[in-house]
Image (cartoon, helix red, strand yellow):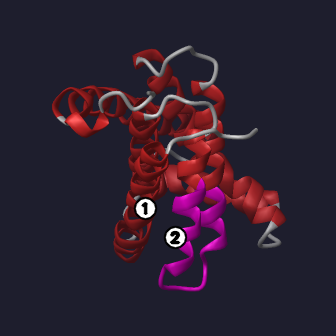
Amino acid sequence: MKLKLTTRQLVTLAVFGALWGVVEISLGSVLKALNIPFSGAVLSAIGLMIAMIARQFVPRRGTTIFVGIIAMVLKLFSIGNIIIGPMVGIIMEAILAEIVLSLFKTPGMVACLLAGMTGSLWSLIQPFVTGVLLFGRDLFSIWLDTLDLGERIFGIDTSAAWLIVLVLVVVYAAIGLVSGWLARSVGKLLMARLPYFKNQNS
């Protein structure tokens, strides 16, 4: 897929991609250090919100992935050794959001809600993919970690595995929906108030 973008559009996407990358580098390190629950989902939601706002400014197919690639490259400058997982997360979230947004003619509220939810749910699924393929873990240990997370945060006994999974899916989906709602709302506000972003498609 070849993007034909003006210089202004490229600069716009680069700015938002850099913003996503800075959030991942700065806030990501803080959340990891504090060991805050659902930090991955929160980072995903913020990143997706930025990418979806960018998509409203430049509503062209492929632009969400473009923003994600910039953020992923900037993630290389993070402090620490484990950056492959977050980098995979960034690009996969961008790809999933792009797929959903591309199903709609324009990135309206419904499109943003679905894209945010889909991208956020990847944060829940990713350990089962990257843990096995990149870090040599087995699915059973990852599954046990997921159940332990549900027990630790929600107080649900690990024997009720189906309930833990259901609650986690609802929480991650809700975070994604909030991301989508904010993306659409903030995007409309910025488009209306910032003259620079008008006529981006001209």
| Magenta-colored stretch includes residue 101 | no
Question: In this figure, which residue is indicated by the disc labeled 2?
Answer: 74
SS majority, magenta: helix
Q: Secondary structure at mark 1?
A: helix
Q: Secondary structure at mark 2?
A: helix
Q: Residues within 10 Å of mark 1 (few under 14, many from 20)?
A: many
Q: Residues within 10 Å of mark 2 (few under 14, many from 20)?
A: some
Q: Is residue 128 above or below residue 187?
A: below
Q: Position of residue 28 (x, y in %)?
A: 41, 67
User: Does the CB distance between marks 1 and 2 fall below 8 Å?
Assistant: yes
At 52% from the left edge and 56% from the top edge, which residue is drawn? Answer: 149
Please name the amino acid that badge 2 sits on.
Leu
At 58% from the left edge and 33% from the top edge, which residue is drawn? Answer: 118
Highlighted magenta segment, given as a residue range: 69-90
Which mark, residue 18? 1
Which of the 4 image quadrants contains residue 105? top right
Is residue 159 among what the camera can see? no
Is residue 128 among what the camera can see? yes
Q: Residue furthest left?
A: 193
Q: Position of residue 57 (x, y in %)?
A: 40, 34
The C terminus - image quarter: top left
Q: Is residue 175 above or below residue 59?
A: below
Q: Position of residue 140 (x, y in %)?
A: 79, 58
Q: Earlier in the sequence, mark 1 or mark 2?
A: 1
Relative to 131, 155 lies left or right: left
Please name the amino acid that badge 1 sits on.
Ala
